[in-house]
Amino acid sequence: MTGADGATTTGWLFVHPDLVPERWRARVRPLALVPLLPDETRDLLATGRITDTAIGDLGEDFVQLVAAGTSRENIVRALGLSMRTVDRRFARLREHLGVDSRAEVAAELVRRGW
């Protein structure tokens, strides 16, 4: 990795934010350490992604089809759902992700690893 000044990064230091020297503050990267429950660890290792429960509750097949940009009609056919069910699930997904359009939903799902 190359720093803002063009210098090559040779290592990483984990330190409390209050202890970062002023001269390093422009290079600080946010980090979150999250202890995982056994089921979460197993799911992460099995799928290679972090599953948002609210998204996963809509059905993994449904979410993957939406992320791929599949039309509503093709989702209905592929999953054997009614158009109303597809529309309700899509509305919940759009609300959960905080976006307005179908394209934004697909882009956000891809960004999240779906």
Image (spheres, rainbow, N blue to C red):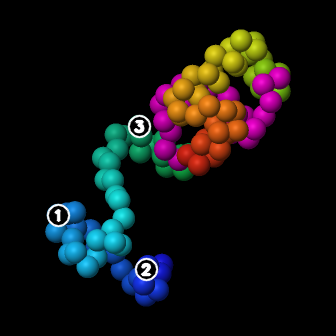
Along the line of sight, the residue nearer the viewer: 30 or 46: 30
Magenta stretch: residue 1 in it? Answer: no
Most extreme residue toward the bottom is 7
Whole-percent x and y of residue 85? Answer: 68, 14
Whole-percent x and y of residue 14? Answer: 26, 68
Callout 3: helix, strand or loop? helix
Q: Which residue position holds label 2?
A: 3
Q: Label 3 vs label 2: CA separation? A: 37 Å
Above or below, 87 relative to 51: above
Q: Label 3 vs label 1: CA separation? A: 34 Å
Above or below, 77 relative to 44: above
**Split into 4 quadrants, where in the image is the C terminus?**
top right
Of the residues tagged 3 and 2, which is closer to the observer?
A: 2
Q: Where are the magenta residues, as a range?
A: 49-73
Along the line of sight, the residue nearer the viewer: 38 or 101: 101
Q: Residue at x 78, y 34 (%)?
A: 70
Q: Which residue position holds label 1?
A: 18
Mark 3 or 1, nearer chain start = 1
Which amino acid, mark 1?
A: Asp
Can residue 78 be seen here? The reply is no
Magenta stretch: residue 58 in it? Answer: yes
- Crowd rating for badge 3 (residues with CA inside 10 Å; few <14, some 14–19, many 20+): few
Whole-percent x and y of residue 84? Answer: 71, 12
Callout 1: helix, strand or loop? helix
- Crowd rating for badge 2 (residues with CA inside 10 Å; few <14, some 14–19, many 20+): few
